Image (cartoon, helix red, strand yellow):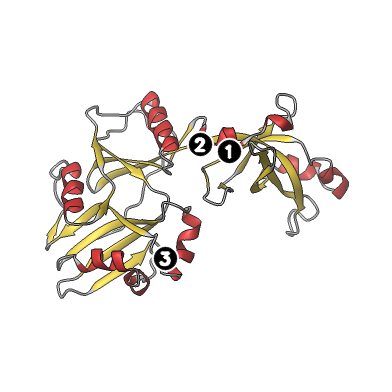
Amino acid sequence: MSDKTLPKFKNYTGQKVNWIQGKLDGHYTKVVCDAFGNKKATSKKPIDITEKLMAIPHIRNQINSMPNSSQILCEMHCPEEDATSVPTLLNAADERLMLTVFAVPMWCGISWEEQPTGAVDLGELMITMAGLGFDVVHAIRVTADFVDEKGCDALNELAVRNKLEGHVLKVSHMSGWFKLKPVRELDAFITDTEMSTSDSYYGMLKCVRLAVYNPDGTEHDLGNCGIGDLSIKLKYDTQAKRDALIGHVMEVKYDLIGAKGGMRFPRFGRWRDDEKTKAECTTEQFNWYKGMQIR
C-alpha cells in the first residue's frame, strides 16, 4: 500500500466530495499487522516507532487487537498539546497520547484500498472500528458533488471552534483526499527583533518577536515570525532601525495557536500601525480566522 499524498489546490470549487473528516493536530502513523501477526508502526518519514507506541498501555491494547493481514492509518496526537510536542510525549511514553484511526486500507486480508469508488461506506466503517475499541475520526457524508467557497468557510469556522487543524475532504475511503485548512490572522505588536547571520542576508532583519495582551493586561508571547519580504529585510539593516520596530503593530497569518501559546507556521501579513494600536492587540483574536487555504 502506498502512503497517501494530499493534492494541493488554490481553489477547491468544483472538486467532487463525498466524505468529510476532521484533521487532528498530530502525526501520521501507519500500523500493520502482517499475515503472521507481527505488528509494526511507522511514522510518515517512515521511522519505526513500534516499540515506543507499545510502551503506552491503551495504544498497545489497540494494536494487539488487530487481526492478521490488517492495516490502519492513524493520527497520533494529544488533545492537550500541539503536534510539535508529540515526539517528546512519545519518547516519554506519555499516556495522554492517542492513536486515532481515519482510514483502513486492509482488514483481515481484504484490501479496502482496491475497492471501487463508493463501495466502502466510510461512515459505517469508522463506526465499526469504534465498536471494536479503536479511537476514530468519524466521517460526515456529503450529498453535494462539490464544496463551494461558502461551504469551505463554514468548515473552517467549525475547525476553529473545535480546535482542529482543518478537514480532509474525500472522494472515497482511499482516494481523492484533499486537505482544507483555515488561514488565521491576527494583529500583534513587536517585542524584539533578530538580525540575520546568513551569508545572503547578513546584517538584515531576520525575524520579529510578537505578542498580544491577555485580558489581565499582561503580555502573551506568540513567538518569532520570519520576515520573507526582501524589501523589508533590506530596509532594516542596522540595529537602530530594527530597534525602532519594537512596539509596531503588524498583521500575521498562522495555522494554529499551539498548546504552549505560540503560533504555528506564522508568516508576515502587512503593517497595521495606521489602523490598529498596540492596546487593541489582544488574545480575543484567537477564535477568528480570515480566508482559507487548500493544500
Q: Position of residue 34 (x, y in %)?
A: 19, 71
Image height of 36 relative to 276, above or below: below
* Camera-nearest residue between 136 and 18: 136
Asked which quadrant contains residue 166, the reply is: top left
Residue at position x 22%, y 61% in the image: 71
Return the disc, 3 or 1, that comes first in the chain's sequence: 3
Residue labelled with disc 1: 253
Q: Amino acid at mark 2?
A: Val
Residue at position x 42%, y 33% in the image: 156
Q: Secondary structure at mark 1?
A: strand
| Disc on res. 183 | 2
Q: Secondary structure at mark 3?
A: loop
* Camera-nearest residue between 105 and 68: 68
Q: How far is disc 3 from disc 1 in space, using C-alphas?
A: 32 Å
Q: Amino acid at mark 3?
A: Asp
Residue at position x 37%, y 72% in the image: 52
Can residue 113 be seen by looking at this rendering? Answer: no
Residue at position x 21%, y 75% in the image: 38
